[in-house]
Image: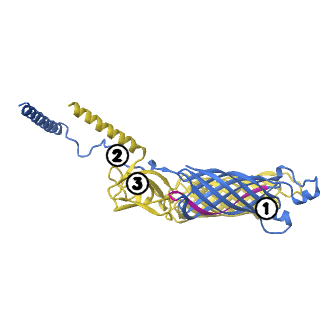
Amino acid sequence: MTVRILLSILILFCAGAGHVQAAEYPSVKVAEPYLDLRTGPGRGYPKTQIVERGDWVEVMMRRTDWIKVRTRKGFEGWAHQDDMAKTLDPDGEPTQISTVGEGEFVHRRWEVGFKVGTFAGARTSDAYLGYYFTDNLSAEVTVGEAFGTSVDFQFLNLSLTHQPWPQWRYSPYITLGGGAKQTSYASTEVQLSSRTDQTLHAGLGLRVYLTRQLMARAEYRNTVILTDQEQNEESDEWTIGLSAFF
Amino acid sequence: MDNRFIRLFLSAVVLAMGTTGAVFAEEQSILEDPPVIDPNVVRLGLKDADIDDENFEVGAFIGFMSVEHFGTHEVYGIRGAWHVNEDLFFEANYGMTSVDQTPAEYAAGDFNLFTDDDRDFIYYNLSLGFNILPGEVFMTSDWAFNSSFYLLAGGGTVDFLGEKEFALNIGMGLRVVATDSLALHLTFQDIMTDKLKQLSDGSDGSAHNMQYSASLTYFF
């Protein structure tokens, strides 16, 4: 009986110790005939090891589409997420590996990116962050700078954009909003102090789903600058950009 | 005699244990018939959130930058990158260098065209990076680090001599991944400024401000 108790304790201890080791990284079981492991996270790195069907590997970390795993013998290598999706988790279910695709493009919540183009003849570059309330409607904050030959602009604005067909790969949208624009005169010949004006804008654009989390974007905006003078100024802005969505 | 007694006793004990075990198991199965579907089942399954994603990289760089017409000086800055996939990444850079007098100022002696603040060449840009030529750098015959050669292209802002302008940049680099979370870069970038070209020799076109730097980055 003492021996049994001792043995049980020993078994429990071993299981416990084993469990502690396993708890560090989750394990998955290879279900395909074999799993290829490469030396690095990319298709250009050589395959140096295979894991046979039925063997378990520990899932250590992920970089882009590649997952670093450790075999029972302690060998570390990188497996592609598509191959990892064919392994089985401890419940015997296929391992859940999330990938970003066109489906997520439709239901995205956040969009971040940058655009370059021309604003009133000056070269402009801006960065933006958008939040989608629904698949159609989003609010966007944009900060940017434009540099002309004698005048520089810095602007900050808030827009509301609406895309009627979010499920389209080429999805047009309209944008409306306002903000502030600071104008400074770079030329040293005319000493003009910088000024800040309020702006209103309306525009049309197109978002194009590229791949994974990326989309391209092209936009035309007509900006009305509310000046103190008799007439308000109007400026055209044409930009193209690249966004990532989450 | 003793031996036989012990053997008999042991057999009895084993039998007793075996039977009680069986009876016990039977009793248990009758008393607590497990439901067909156990609602309290613990799913051990691997969730995607359990895997540590390491696609962001931040770091600092130091090197030399040749500002056209103003000579070559130390440059330092910070950089950050987001790796979209194995081929593509976004990179942001912020760097600065301070230049000395122009040749004209040297020639003129104690005469300065620009203030010290204006002599700070500050730039920030956003680039798209392409990983090409993935490989390994071998330190010894059995000690190697993963590496990748990459190309950079992007645009940003240069603030120099009291003027700001939009500047395109192109570059290339070598990334050596030392550990899972640390990488060493050797990078070359050309930041093209039109206003500087105009200033330096009065001609149209771009001044090529070449920068070579080494950086240490951390993946998270």
Element type where label 1 sits in the image? loop
Mark 3, chain letter? Answer: A
Do labels 3 and 1 touch, CB within 8 Å?
no
Question: Are the residues flagged by discs 1 and 2 from a single subunit?
Answer: no
Magenta stretch, residue numbers: B141-159
**Residue A20 sits above or below residue A136 on the image:** above
Measuring 65% from the left and 53% from the top, which residue is drawn there?
A: B215
Mark 1, chain letter? Answer: A
**Residue A148 numbered mark, or none:** 1
| Residue wearing tag 2 | B43
| Residue wearing tag 3 | A96
Q: Nearer the viewer, residue B210 or A145?
A: B210
Q: Is residue B83 magenta?
A: no
Q: Give how far across and how far down residue B151 sits, in percent.
A: 63, 64
Q: Colour of chain A?
A: yellow
Q: CA distance from mark 1 to mark 2?
A: 61 Å
Label 3 Cα neighbours within 10 Å, binned few <14 / some 14-19 / many ≥20: some
Do labels 1 and 2 touch, CB within 8 Å?
no
Marks 3 and 1, the one that precedes in the sequence: 3
Drawn side of residue B160 relative to residue B139, left or right: right
Q: Give how far across and how far down residue B165 sits, in percent.
A: 77, 59
Instruction: Please name the amino acid that badge 1 sits on.
Output: Gly
Magenta residues: mostly which secondary structure? strand
Q: Colour of chain B?
A: blue
Q: Nearer the viewer, residue A2 or A220?
A: A2
**Residue A7 sits above or below residue B190 on the image:** above
**Residue B152 numbered mark, or none:** none
